[in-house]
Amino acid sequence: MTLPKGPSAGLLLLIFAVALALFFGAPLGELAWRSLSAADGGLTLAHYAEYLTSPGLQRSLVNTAVLGAWVVALVTPAAFLIAYGLERTRLPLKGMLASLAAAPLLVPSLLPALALVYLFGRQGLLKPMLGGWTIYGAPGLVIADSIAALPHAVVILRTALSGADARLYEQAKLLGASGWKRFWTITLPGCRHGLVAAALVVFALTIADVGAPKVVGGGFDVLALDIYKQVIGQQNFEMGAVVAIMLLLPTAAAILFERHAASRQAASVSAQAKAYHPEPDRGRDLVVGIGCVLIALAIAAVMATAQLAAVVRQWPYDLSLTGIHYDFDRYDGGGWSAITNSVMLALVTAVVGTVLAFVGAYLAERSQAGRGLKRVYSVLALGPAAVPGLALGLGFALFFNDPANPLHLIYGTVGILIAANVVHFFTVAHLTSVSMLKSLDPAFEPAARVLGRGGLTLFGRVIAPLSAPALVEIALYLFVNAMTTVSVVVFLYPPEFKLAAVAVLNMDDAGDSAPAAAMGMLILYVNIAARIVGGLALRRLARRSTPVETPDTVLAGVAP
Amino acid sequence: MSASALELRGLSKRFGRTLAVDGLNLDVPTGSFVCLVGPSGCGKTTALRLIAGLESPSEGAILSEGVDITRRHPAERGLGMVFQSYALFPNLTVGANVSFGLPGAMPTAQKQARVAELLELVGLAAFAQRRPADLSGGQQQRVALARALAPGPRILLLDEPLSALDPHLRDQLRAELKALQARLGITTIMVTHDQAEALALADQIAVMRGGRLEQVGSPEAIYGAPANAFVASFIGPLNQLPATVGEAGQVVLANGARIAADISGLAKGAAVIATIRPDAVRIAGASDAGALSGQVIAREFAGASVRLSIRLGDEGGPVLRLDVGADHPRASAGLGEVVDVALPADQVRLFAAEPRA
Ligand SMILES: Nc1ncnc2c1ncn2[C@@H]1O[C@H](COP(=O)(O)OP(=O)(O)O)[C@@H](O)[C@H]1O
Ligand SMILES: [Mg+2]
């Protein structure tokens, strides 16, 4: 019994590659095609011309760039401060700081925007503080998107800062360099790739976000919102496709550049590097600590506001407690079933996505499949991270809605939601699998082959058990993101299968912002519960004391 | 006359533009211990993987007991392999590792008996329930050996099985490995870059360079009668002195000194490399004619002997290394002192000067 030998591994990988092509390449192709197709079926640039000459849409283009730039300028230093606090200081309560900094990952991106409206909006508690200013428009958008993007940048910069080589610092100290000088000559240059990567990812995430613009955008239109309006409001799929392509191009450029830089940096890490342990330094800890506390407080305040608004009768006039906003069935969002639907979808996405990503990565990294096929698959698997959820979702809608498409049967079912979610978050799952698999001895497969044991036995008895911690991480990542994403599912969910994150958007749209906040916070609690369960699973796995370490997760990677 | 356990015929492997293994011809007699040695990157591992069936050759054939096995699945070649990293499965117990390659159809009791037998063989009977990470490097190596032997292979392949170990442990395990191989009488092919290991273990040594075999022979033959300067210098410390063939059984060194050597078959004036091992150079006595003298420029104490480096002639002259017994009066020669040495003609070996790359 020597299953599967070369050919079957190759066949399996071929199926994986074809599936990715069908569920990723084809929808994107359809999107591009529709943006170029004329009414008579021919090719035309008319939609682009129309788009570029429409003053409203032109303004969106500029607004989007301005928004992205502002958020990058705000988030990169803030995230660096937090990452520095976590990795390079002796601050107390690091666990709490890390949790707070990660909290925005666990909620839909429109929740911070919602909270900002509660604080500074027309009936905002703190509105008087703004003087004549208004939160609606660019200021609110910048702040809301900054909060949403911050955790992603923190993860990237923590990775960059944790890779420090203590030997450099020891050498610099021997040469008499001051702490300040060591920071400028070693620390900053050492994580310049991380800084660039963080900036690019933040930019890509921000311009692809549709939640915050919907809630606090005011008249400040951006591309993502335009797509939403064209498709949902005007049913103008061609124009939606044009805008989606306009959004896709800079996003893809940013993410591909980031990946390129990341792979170059991975190659430059010295194998002999010695782990860095920060030494006591009161002054440093005080300065960094104050900054971290301010940022953490801002996040906590936003979350607390959303929770508070959800449980009071009418913010800010009647602050008496009530559970009335949790009676979701009274509002037009999908009711409680939206939550259960979302949990179900997230669970299935987590399981299906983890299995597919891991098996695919295994075949591409360690099987005997052909080299060319492996490379094709690896490149395909990197693609989804470069595509904004709205563009992918619209591509899915266009591609699978076509009755001539044999895969049309998944249109309007939960199946298309699972597929879209798995594809959307596939790259990070794939890369995490790859780095796990790379950390395992490459001689396992040859050893098993000489011993006459097939790939399946080895996979089941050795590879999968050793990779269990990474599998849990991937499943958690998929679950949390499937719970919070709006963009990729907003064009796809069937009318009878409402989703929680979309319900937040729709209820807020309908003026029911308190139930929207309530549901947004529920998503947070579901995700926290998932993280706790995942954490317990990881701890149990660690106690089984497998000597293999989890690789540095690349969960820093992003699917905007 | 039984056929060889293994026979390589014109075996080559090409990776893109690199020719990792280039036309290997090798005969491995049943029950013998063959060492493939050569510098890092010379294609040893690739050769072993070709034999194991983990790579398929670009050209050539592999025969086992006269049967062509070139295209056989690795598991059907009747061989066991120990990898450089050992490739033990860290999540499985030692026992489960050893039984990994036993046929699935084998009854459990029989498997357990086989595992116990093998662990006994490698002296790890008490360790069946441990995990590899709880074992020392030497113990892990023995588990890998037990796992490779479990299915009862006829040939054992070892890829640098000792290189991951501490030097002092290496000598001990070397002896154990040799004893085990002798006891089992199993045909063994071991890859190593350590010539001392090869000399100590092998019945036959095959020296490789750049994918090709340079020489195959017994350790004594390889050490005592190397086929070329590369083999001679790879297999042990060697003085290499550029020289030209002179007259009357002599070669002339760069500084004009003459040394006696067997120049039969060489044209006068031909450029050669005169070689002699440091342990073959003697301190000259009163009776030695044609002794060379040189100034000590370095001195390394090595326990039973002292290695002196002396410069023949003036500044820039050739340097000769010699091993002097620690109890020899001249062993205490200090830097700058002059030492007279003799190079026994039968120990001087001449090789054609290779064009320097
Ligand atoms: N899978 C491979 N792909 C490409 N080149 C390889 C591969 N395996 C080995 N090589 C090359 O073949 C040569 C011989 O390698 P190897 O057999 O590992 O040498 P050794 O074991 O003697 O150190 C090296 O130049 C190496 O880079
Ligand atoms: Mg090797």
Image (spheres, helix red, strand yellow):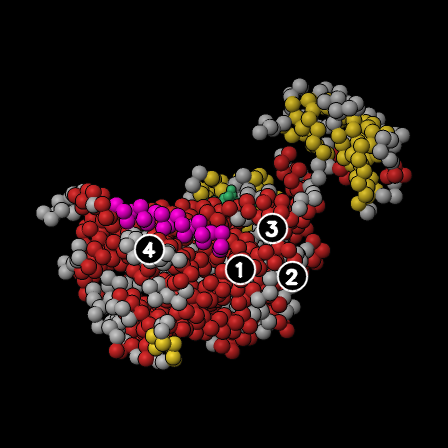
Between circles 4 and 1, the one closer to the viewer is 4
Q: Amino acid at mark 3?
A: Asp
The chief SS type of the magenta part is helix
User: Mark 1 falls within which chain?
Assistant: A
Q: Which residue is mark 3?
A: A165
Subunit that carries the residue with mark 3: A
CA separation in Å, label 4 and label 3: 44 Å
Mark 1 or mark 3: name the one nearer the start of the chain. Answer: 3
Left or right for A86, reference A146: right
How would you rate the neighbour count of disc 4 (Cα within 10 Å): few for under 14, some for 14-19, many for 20 or more? some
The residue positioned 59% from the left and 56% from the top of the image is A287
Label 3 near ligand 1 (CB < 8 Å): no
Q: CA distance from mark 1 to mark 3?
A: 24 Å
Q: Are marks 2 and 4 on the same chain?
A: no
Instruction: Look at the numbered disc 2 and say if its residue's Cβ is closer than 8 Å to ligand 2.
Output: no
The three-letter amino acid code for the residue at tag 1 is Cys
What element does badge 4 sit on?
loop
- Comparing marks 2 and 1, which lies closer to the viewer? 1
Name the quadrant containing residue B156: bottom right
Residue nearest the observer in this picture, A348 or B76: A348
Task: Determine whether, in the image, residue B24 is placed left or right of residue B266.
Answer: left
Say which residue label 2 marks.
B138
Instruction: Kindly identify the amino acid type of the residue bearing the numbered disc 4.
Output: Gly
Can you identify the residue that label 4 sits on? A137
Q: Element at badge 1?
A: helix
Residue A292 numbered mark, or none? 1
**Residue A476 visible:** no
Start and end of the magenta stretch? A58-79
